[in-house]
Amino acid sequence: MDIFSILGMVGGLAFFLFGMHTMGQGLEKLSGGRMEKILEKLTDNTFKGLLLGALVTAVIQSSSATTVMVVGFVNSGIMKLSQAVGVIMGANMGTTVTSWILSLTGIEGDSVYIKLLKPTNFAPVFAIVGVVLIVFLKDSKKNTLGSILIGFAILMVGMDTMSKAVEPLADVPDFTNILTMFSNPLLGILAGAVLTAIVQSSSASVGILQALTVTGGITYNIAIPIVMGQNIGTCVTALISTVGANKNAKRAGFIHLYFNIIGTTVIYLIYWIINSLFNIEMFSNAVNSGNIAVIHTVFNILSTMLLLPFARQLERLAVITVRDKSKDTKLPIIDSRLLETPSVAVAQCLNVTVDMAHIVKDSFKKALSLIHNYNEKVAEEVIRLENLSDRYEDILGTYLVKLSGKNLNGKDSRIVSKMMLSIGDLERIADHSANIVYSIRSMNEKKLSFSKGALEEFEIIKKALEEILDISVKAFESNDIKLANKVEPLEQVIGKIQNEIKNNHINRLKKGNTTVERGLIHSDLLTSFKRVADHCSNIAVCIIQINRKSFEVHEYLKEIRANDEMYKDDYRNFREKYRLQI
């Protein structure tokens, strides 16, 4: 084997790994947030988790990615540890799909139909279609589909290049002697585990083994231990991902490890006993890529059948391994591991942002309730929620910056933009809730109170503020443009009410019915009210503009105020609904 053959083999491996990465990334991107929605539907039914884990892994072509995703879900509190067991088992089954696709490279025959099944014949067609979809079309989904097709074509070219490069090794005695070493089951398992740990993908390492079958030196006795070791090696990725995670996330990583170690031990013992008793000659025969796919599939199905009834015991074993040394004091809002699957990270960020919006809405309504009935416990709760919203903004802001640098599809990119533009407005609403508390607390400490007229006016603007916040949060959560369009006319009405209340207060001040000290607090409250309405308007306009793929905010507002009949109708309705009794 000369230097050019070595370069061909290494180059083929590079194409193979890059193609697998590109195809898997494209499949994950095309699936959008649907994977998370599928996994979130899990119940404590382990069998259902098994099926869903297999489905998700078959889609994204990586059991490591699915397991890392599960670790992230457990760490974030989305998924219980008991739910993770079935998904992890299913991931091992789902990853066998790749080996069957790769086994098509070994198809031989003169029939036109058989030739069409050979990847080296249809891969160029996939590549051409992929290039057309990426270069000539602007649609993001079609571009992603193009990257999947190109990734598959590169994957198959790499597989074919590797196979052709290693084929001459069949006539090299030293290579045959090296392979013979792996007939020792411990060495075979170790080799499979190390190879998979290096390439970080059992699908990729199984593909490399399939490429080596063209030498004719890989027998069943060699292949079986290596495939078993490859399933153990894939656990390394999940275990690395648990570094810095909470105890349940670490336990999920160990469940994956124990599942593969126990499955490998038991199934190899069964294989060894059968081979020793009956001395089956077939196990000494050379295998092809299709046989490797069969071994990989049978092993994972048998492991699952064997250990599925003991899912609870696997969970307990992981709990014993990672004990409760102390209570978890830190509960991460979102998990950095989810960045490896951007569409899932986007969906989770959206869930967290919606949680933040509800926290902010709750804090503001509690703050408004203090105007008529001051309660120190409620005031402290508003301050706590304001501090919590600060934490949400910090964590979300940092995470979204990282997420925006990922390869997102058009829909996910718009969602990230919406979140980045809205979390600041949400946090500022919480700040104004705290400002209201400070104003009312100061008034309470000084034994001051508002006049009956002022309280009646505050009651009207309070209801309008609660409605505009309800509409804004609901529009954000459901991405409802029709609902978001109602925010701007209500914001204008609240501005009118604020001016009217201010004028009424000045009149009361002139008549001596109130004091300057109460007037300052009155003014601070009105300023906070107006600012909250403005921030609600910002959120609604953001929803509308991002869906319209336009950021000309001032032009948009000018246009709807002047020409939009629906805006005018909504304005009249809200004006009538919240009219002051002057």
Image: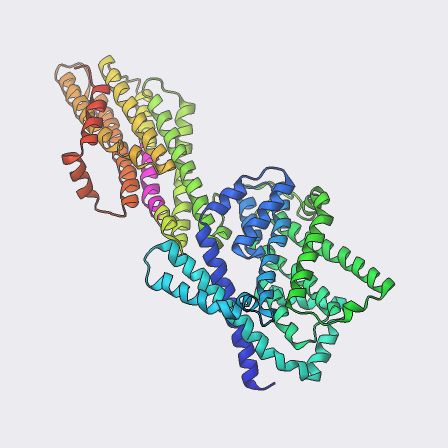
Q: In the image, residue 232 lies at what x, y percent?
A: 67, 59
Q: In which quarter of the image is residue 235?
A: bottom right
91 or 415, nearer to the observer: 91
In the rendered structure, does residue 119 fall within the stretch colored magenta? no
Q: In the image, residue 3 lies at what x, y percent?
A: 56, 85
Is 418 positioned to the left or the right of 18 in the image? left
The correct choice, above or below, for 103 with respect to 175 in the image is above
Q: In the image, residue 247 lies at what x, y percent?
A: 61, 46
Is 207 positioned to the left or the right of 36 in the image? right
Residue placed at 79% from the left, 60% from the top? 271
Q: Residue furthest bottom?
A: 2
Residue placed at 57% from the left, 78% from the top? 164
Q: In the image, residue 33 lies at what x, y percent?
A: 45, 46
**Image quadrant containing the C terminus:** top left
409 or 503, nearer to the observer: 409
Q: How many numbered marks are there?
A: 0
Residue placed at 72% from the left, 54% from the top? 263
The correct choice, above or below, for 175 with respect to 299 in the image is below
In this orientation, does residue 84 appear?
no
Is 551 positioned to the left or the right of 247 in the image? left
Is 297 positioned to the left or the right of 199 in the image? right
> What range of the chain is rendered magenta?
417-432
